[in-house]
Image (spheres, grey):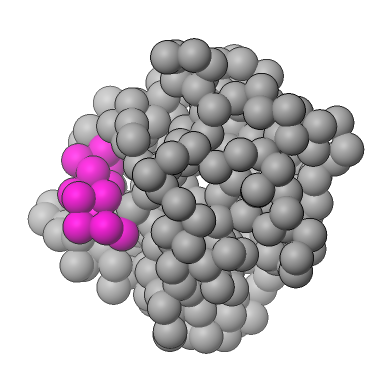
Amino acid sequence: MSSRDTAPSEITPSVLLRAYACGIFPMSESADDPTIFWVEPEKRGIIPLDGFRVASRLARTVRADTFRVTVNTAFKQTIAGCAAPQRGRDDTWINGRIRDLYTSLHEIGHCHSVEAWRGDHLVGGLYGVSLGRAFFGESMFHTERDASKVALVHLVARLLAGGFVLLDTQFVTDHLRTFGAVEVPRRRYRMLLDEAVTGHGDFFALPASRPVTGAEALACLTQT
């Protein structure tokens, strides 16, 4: 269950950031639905950064640099990939207004993408919002096996290196549970959020000017 309120027609990046700081986020019913509504789940999905789990097979894939991983080099492509139909998911909650809104957040430095490449082809990735020491994961996609998982490993490494304390996944899926995702009650989430939005998390503590290697990413995970 979650509480939902229709969002006003005009949402600015600053309004959106204030909403995240209050524990709410926007969604749409479908890609073709022009309306947006606010969501505040009664139970919130998070991945405790000190409890992030990487299966041994995935760790080998990360270490082998099967995919070249970059940050903020293909934001619009990444959000388009997240909005596209995928196996087991014919529709998406990412409509045109949401794409435009998060692109505006990206342009002012509060929304980031992590991209996984095979050669010159974008084959997976994710995007989300950063605010203080909190990162709010929005969506991920893949067209090759493990591509989005590798992007998530690199994201968590970057968050740990940058002093973040909260990784919000909004909801918990069986897929996210394999990485250690849990549900927390709304009241507990708000306490975590209040702590996380204070201070400053450095999303670029790991370099963004070059691809970070899998070995570098895994080293960040083991240093916690």
Of the 4 image quadrants, the one containing the N terminus is bottom right
Question: Would residue 104 be counted in the magenta stretch?
Answer: yes
Relative horizontal placement of residue 119, taking residue 48 as reference (left or right): left
Q: Residue at x 26, y 50 (%)?
A: 106
Tell me if I can see residue 134 in this picture: no
Of the 4 image quadrants, the one containing the C terminus is bottom right
Q: Residue at x 66, y 22 (%)?
A: 66
Q: Could you tell me residue 75's position as x and y percent?
A: 32, 36
Main SS class of the magenta portion in the image: helix
Q: Residue at x 80, y 51 (%)?
A: 53
Q: Quadrant of residue 200?
A: bottom left
Q: Is residue 172 above or below residue 56?
A: below
Q: Nearer the viewer, residue 192 or 144?
A: 144
Relative horizontal placement of residue 163, taking residue 204 as reference (left or right): right
Q: Is residue 144 above or below residue 215?
A: above
Q: Could you tell me residue 96's position as x and y percent?
A: 23, 33
Q: Nearer the viewer, residue 23 or 221?
A: 221
Relative horizontal placement of residue 40, taking residue 219 as reference (left or right): left
The residue sitting at the left extreme is 10
Q: Quadrant of residue 15?
A: bottom left
Q: Residue at x 53, y 16 (%)?
A: 118
Q: Nearer the viewer, residue 114 or 142?
A: 114
Q: Could you tell me residue 169's position as x and y percent?
A: 57, 54
The count of marks equals 0
Which residues are the magenta region?
98-110
Tell me if I can see residue 159 in this picture: yes
The residue sitting at the right extreme is 56
